[in-house]
Image (cartoon, rainbow, N blue to C red):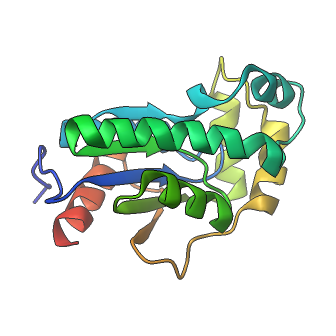
Amino acid sequence: MPATPGHVPASPCAIVVMGVSGCGKSTLGALLADALDGPFLEGDSFHSADAVAKMRGGQALTDEDRWPWLDRLGVAAVEGLREHGVVVVACSALRLAYRDRLREAIDAPVRFVFLAQTRERLLARLGDRSGHYMPASLLDSQLATLEPPEQEMATMTLAVEAPPEVLRDTVLDWLRSA
C-alpha cells in the first residue's frame, strides 16, 4: 500500500536528499516536497556564479567553495521550516563534514536520504541529462569525495533501482515511522 501524501512529520523536519550528481536527488526531492506540501530547495541553485563556472569548466569544488554554499542552503532550509514546518533539500552533501554543517545551520531535526547508484548507471544518467552545468567528467571526483552516511543517525540509503514514486513512498513510510 503506498504512503499517504500530505503526511508531515510531527515536529519541524528537514529532509535532505543526497548523493553524487545524476543520482536522482532533484526528482525524488520534488516528489517528496509535493507529497509533504512543503518547499523544495534545489541545492544547485544556491551555488555562487564562480562555483558554477568552475564546475562548468571541469574543475572540482574545494571545501572553501562549498562552505558558503552549504551556509546559504542552511539559511534557506531554516526559512522553509519556519514557514511550512517541513522542507526538502536536494544537496550532494558528500562528506560527513558537509552534512554536519547543514545539521548545525538548520538546528532542527534533519533526515538524510542517500541515493546510491553504480558508477555505470550514473554515467548513463549524466549522459541523458541536458542543460546542466555539471559535466560527467567530474563524477569520479565526486565519488572519491563521497563518504556514505552508513553509520549516521536519521539516515536512510536507497538503491535507486525502483521508480521515483516508489522511492518517495519508501521515504514517506520511513518518515512516518520516525
Position of the N terminus by quadrant: bottom left
Q: Could you tell me if residue 34 is visible in this image? A: no
Q: In this view, does 86 lie above or below 112?
A: above
x and y percentages locating residue 119 in the rendered image: 72, 55
State the residue at coordinates (79%, 40%).
65
Q: In this view, does 130 lie above or below 67?
A: above
State the residue at coordinates (57%, 47%).
23
55 relative position to 18: left or right? right
The quadrant where residue 70 appears = top right
The quadrant where residue 51 appears = top right
Position of the C terminus by quadrant: bottom left
Q: Nearest the camera: 45 or 85?
A: 85
In the displayed image of the protein, which residue is found farthest to the top?
131
Q: Nearest the camera: 128 or 167?
A: 167
Q: In this view, does 7 lie above or below 76?
A: below
x and y percentages locating residue 166 in the rendered image: 29, 52
State the residue at coordinates (27%, 40%).
82
The quadrant where residue 31 appears = top left
12 relative position to 44: left or right? left
Counting labels gives 0
Q: Nearest the camera: 75 or 60?
A: 75
120 relative position to 64: left or right? left
Q: Could you tell me if residue 75 is visible in this image? A: yes
x and y percentages locating residue 25 in the rendered image: 49, 44
x and y percentages locating residue 156 in the rendered image: 42, 69
State the residue at coordinates (44%, 43%).
89
Q: Nearest the camera: 105 or 115?
A: 105
